[in-house]
Amino acid sequence: MDTIGIMAGSGQFPFLIARNAKKNGYRVVICGFHDNADPALQAEADAFIMLHLGRLGDLIRFFKNQGAHRVCMAGAINKPKAMELKPDFRVAKLIFKLAGRGKGDDAILRAVVEELQSEGISVVRPDALASDLLSPPGILSAKKPDADLWRDIRFGWSIAKTLGSLDIGQCVVVRSGIVLAVEAIEGTDATLIRGAKLGGPGCTAIKVLKPGQDKRLDLPSLGAATLSLLAEHQYAALAFEASGALFFDREKALETARGHGITVVAVPEDADAFFNSVME
C-alpha cells in the first residue's frame, strides 16, 4: 500500500485530504503543527505526530521512517504565530540560505520543498488528492453582478494580481473603485473584517492565486465560513480564481450567498477574456 504524508495546518482541509486519500487506497501519515492543527486529526491517520513549527529535521525523519515519499501541504498556518518559531539547525541553515532570495511566503515554502526533495520526498498538489474541491468557472450565485459590480471585480482583480506578484497576499477588498484592505500577514478573515469596517455594506472581496505561484503550496481557500463572514459584514460580492482556489462546503456556502444576496464569481484562467465577454 502506497503511503501519502500530510503536513497539516488548521481547518477542515487536512481532514478532507486524509479521508479522500484513504478512500483511494493510500496509507495516511500526518504531521500536525502545534497551535494550528486539530489534535483530532490523529484519528484520521495511520501514524501521527505533532511538531512545533521549525522542527524540519524531525518532520523529515518522521516521513522517511513512515515510508512517505510523497507529501502534501493542507490547512492554514497562523502566520503571526509562525514568526515566533524556534528553528532547529536545519531550518536555521535554510533561513541563512534565504538571505538573498527574500523571505515572503513563497520563498520560504519553496525552500522547504527543496529540503524535502533533497531527502527523496516529493511535494504534490493537494487538489490532486481532492479534485472535487476545485470550482467550475462562471457565476455560481443566483444573483448576477451589475455593471458597477463587474467594474469593482475587474479592478480588484488587477490589484490582487499585482500585489500577489510581490508575494504580499492573496486577497483584497474594494468598493466603488477604491481599495479598502489588502491582505498581509494577518490572513484573509482579518482582511475581510477590516475592509468592511472601512467600506461599510456593499464591499467586494477578491481572492487570487499569486502570479507564478507553485500550486503545491499555499493554495487560496474559501468555504462556508468565508461566506458566513461576508454575509455578517454585508458584502456584495466574492470573486476568486476557479482553477487556483479550494472551495470547501460549496453547496452550503452558495446557500448562504443566496440567502444574503451575495454574488459569487469563479473567474476562469483567461481572466481578461472572461471580463471582456461579460462586460460587453
Image (tube, rainbow, N blue to C red):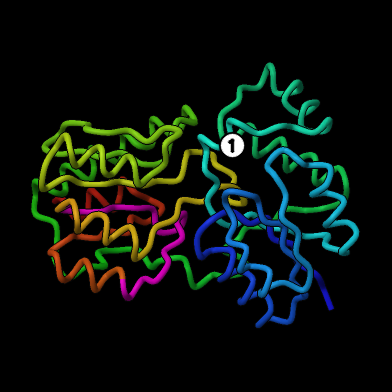
| Residue that appears at 35% across and 47% down | 189
Q: Nearer the viewer, residue 197 or 237?
A: 197
Q: Nearer the viewer, residue 56 or 237?
A: 56
| Residue that appears at 87% across and 51% down | 61
In the current view of this chain or complex, which residue is farthest to the top? 100
Left of 90 or right of it: where is 53?
left
Q: x%, y% of residue 205? A: 26, 47
Q: Is residue 239 a member of the stretch shown in magenta?
A: yes
Residue 88 image-quadrant placement: top right
The part of the chain drawn in magenta is 235-252
Q: x%, y% of residue 13? A: 53, 63
Q: Nearer the viewer, residue 14 or 138?
A: 14
| Residue that appears at 14% across and 57% down | 145
Quadrant of the image containing the N terminus: bottom right
| Helix, strand or loop status at disc 1 | helix
Left of 68 or right of it: where is 45?
left
Could you tell me the amino acid type at mark 1?
Answer: Ala
| Residue that appears at 68% across and 16% down | 100
How would you rate the neighbour count of disc 1 (Cα within 10 Å): few for under 14, some for 14-19, many for 20 or more?
A: some
* Residue marked by disc 1: 82
Vertical arrangement, residue 224 with respect to residue 252, above or below: above
